[in-house]
Image (cartoon, rainbow, N blue to C red):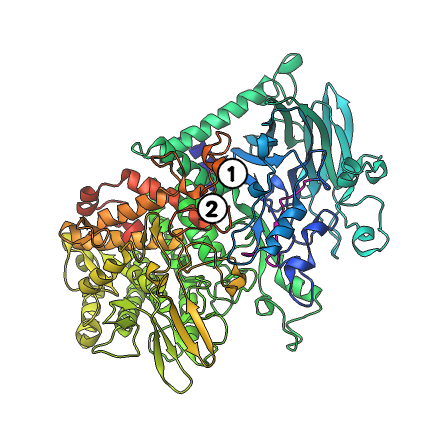
Amino acid sequence: MTRESERLNDAREGRARWMQWGPYLSERQWGTVREDYSDSGDAWNYFTHDQSRSRAYRWGEDGIAGISDDKQVLCFALALWNGKDPILKERLFGLPNSEGNHGEDVKEYYYYLDSTPTHSYMKYLYKYPQAAFPYADLVDTNRRRNRFEQEYELIDTGAFEDDRYFDVFVEYAKDGPDDILIKITVCNRGSEAADLSLLPTLWYRNTWSWGGNPPKPALSGQPATNGIAVIEARDERLGERRLFCDGAPELLFTENETNTQRLFDTPNAQPFVKDAFDRYVVHGEASAINPARTGTKAAALYRLPIPAGAAAEVRLRLSPSAPSASRQGKGKGKAAGPFGDAFEQLLAERKADADAFYASITPAGVSADAAQVMRQALAGMLWSKQYFGYDVLTWLKEHGIDPYRERARTIRNREWSHMFNDDVISMPDKWEYPWYAAWDLAFHAVPLAMVDPEFAKKQLVLMLSERYQHPNGQIPAYEWNFGDVNPPVHPWATLFVYSMEQGQHGRVDLEFLKFSFQKLLMNFTWWVNRKDIEGNNLFGGGFLGLDNIGVFDRSSPLPTGGYLEQSDGTAWMAFFCASMLGIATELAAHDPVYEDLALKFFEHFMRIAGAMDRVGIHNDELWDEEDGFFYDLLYMPGGHVTRLKVRSMVGLLPLCSAVLMPGDAVERLPALSRRALDFIERNPDIMKNIADPRVPGVAGRRLMAVVGEDKLRRILARMLDENEFLSDYGIRSLSRCHLDDPYVFSAGREAFKVQYEAAESTSGMFGGNSNWRGPIWMPVNVLLIRALLTYYLYYGNDFKVECPTGSGQMMTLFEVAREISRRLVSIFERNAAGRRPAFGDSAKFQDDPHWRDYHLFYEYFHGDNGAGIGASHQTGWTGLVAKLIQLFGSLDADSYLQSCSTLMPMVAQVPETVTA
């Protein structure tokens, strides 16, 4: 029990609100759907980066290395100026979708270095060039490039040549739930002295300008005393707080209000507006700031001359009206006040607490390099929490639409007027994707449960609450279109997190499982009613999160007419059933009423699995016997059916539809077992081409799976072929066989081609900012690893396959799973040449001691060389690498196979042991 574990327990049991303050500030609020009030729905161009410094946000705030309270009433972040930039650096810059040759992309370098789950200690690094930031160069060069060229990055502009940049480290340490110490260390990495204007900024989110009568908060300043300036904050929601600023900086004040004069050529309603600090510091407009030293936005201005190779420190403290007396220090001089000797002591203690906490969850056999990857991945997960405010009904009415009175107008998300979001949510990426996505969030819950199972559970439950889940049962997909369809991985994540908490902490949260199961029943009904067009247990679903993996945009009407029956959509539904069966079986051990529901999902699983490959050879089934692979089916308007023979992740996902029943299941649940056996005997044809759950495996376990032994071997032969799916860095999303042999489908005069692309997409489908035609994606790789471990628990050491295919090297399925995991983890680790594949060919990233150990957890990875691609901070599901490091750092094949390990339910769905 570490000190951080104790804080987590205090928070879980309601003794202290350790999570009230955290990194809940977005890194991009401009260009989001919430701020879009256009008629066209063009969010990127309605509220631009250029407007963001002058225009007050409606629904949230953004900043650099920022924190806020959990309702984002009061915010703190950094602003910087190097003396050359045309604007004050108050937020991260990047390209909108229309400007990037591969879609939207942040053009900054920043790193989440550390965080405890209660945010009692956090560390962040921002790299700021000393030359003028190349805004125009980044925009113009990327606009000129086409989809066949690489993105033009900040490192390519020369902004970091000769190390002319600042490393800005920000550390936060809590003395109590609401007493926050802040230390900013600015290192001049260049060979010449350089000046930096640093503006730690405190402001209130504007909640008073949008109607209603919320009380307007106030900030005010006190003259410096004993070298300490103070910004006082007063608000009835948070009470009084103070920002203590060491070193007697100049205090600046203004209002968090829109500069309508600059943006719309309309006189301002008040003289002091949001962009005042930019005008004062960069442009020398003394009249821009409020001489009365009051407002709703304030900053402490530090002008720092920093010699070459040296560093400057700034210390602040955000506290209630006075800091904790125990930490103020006693006596005179450095020992007294909010910045006494105790300040540095507490920072050191909290860092030590973080070290002890991560040591407690890192297996002893993990290398120091892998442990560092694991810790930074989890830090990124914790830093990616964000307050998300969005009242959809109010937003619609502000567009002039009342969904309860009219039906004529079409607008984004009008069917989701019930949604009221006012929560801290795990984001995929707080710049590129500063909005939640359902299947991302389910994957996030897995690594989050390693450090904070309570938060992980709350995230899963949140999507099922009445304020999020649609009354028809659908779970919201993502902000750009809540009604789109994400894969139904929520049930699996629910059981996984439940089992992790049971295994790690010995806690059995049946209430969490019961609530989730009831709401997931509604979601399952929605899927069955909406996505099984013919009622034949074969499913569509649309893009299902895999963007451009298909021949067509699967979320739009097909150019051929007709409809698709999807191998991935059907596999996801079998996976849904398997996960629900696992939950129902666990609950049935405590309450027999769940046996009927367990039987329901057993039967539905069998019907779906049997429908994917019926008895006999047919052209209208997903399994292709000749190829030994699953494909999508295209139904033409005249009734003709075509199998779309693209070898992709779509055909591998049926492997994931497997659930293992423990050997004593028949004895523990005899009534359920009898009824399941009766179903099999009454439906013998269903069993012909799938795994037979009547046949016991290792330790008497029973396997329910879409694929039996023959299909499993045939699919794995392709998956483990390095000329197809197996890369040095994991499983590719599209077989490399389509590099020289692309799949082409002709419809009338138009031809549609799917070709292997190892990196960025050359297709404009889904904005062109994502690619499932070759690269490696962490979430689906993790599901395949989980499937292999499930099959291993059934087949044991006697079942071996070649890995890689054709190598002559035979491996058990455990060894295959471990080998794929090793390849995935190697993306981030230094190889024998001292290079990290994720960094690609960037010499700066690979060799410079101030860069090479700071990790970026990209959205996906190059299918051939492992280089990071897409969103650079999508730590969300890429953070799953932390679970792989922990799992295979402690998992032994034989003991895992033979014992009732608490790790078993994490991979096999149904716990072997049931806690009474």
Figure quadrant of residue 493:
bottom left
Q: Main secondary structure of the magenta part?
A: loop
Asked if one can make out residue 194 in the rendered structure from this viewpoint, the answer is: yes
Check the image and report above or below for 267 versus 195.
Answer: below
User: Residue at image x 34%, y 44%?
Assistant: 884
Left/right placement of residue 358 relative to residue 78 reads left
Range of residues picked out in magenta: 89-103
Asked if one can make out residue 29 in the rendered structure from this viewpoint, the answer is: no
- Disc 1 versus disc 2: distance between alpha carbons? 10 Å
Figure quadrant of residue 224:
top right
Give the quarter of the figure containing the N terminus: top left
The question of residue 843 being in magenta is answered with no
Name which of mark 1 and mark 2 comes first in the sequence: 1
Left/right placement of residue 246 relative to residue 754 reads right
Q: Are marks 1 and 2 in contact (CB under 8 Å)?
A: yes
Check the image and report above or below for 207 versus 313.
Answer: below
Q: Residue 511, position in %: x, y?
A: 40, 53
User: Which residue matches tag 1?
Assistant: 112
User: Residue at image x 25%, y 63%?
Assistant: 705
Check the image and report above or below for 163 versus 738.
Answer: above
Callout 1 secondary element: strand
Number of numbered discs: 2
User: Which residue matches tag 2?
Assistant: 875
User: Residue at image x 62%, y 62%?
Assistant: 392
The question of residue 93 being in magenta is answered with yes
Q: Residue 590, position in %: x, y?
A: 29, 55
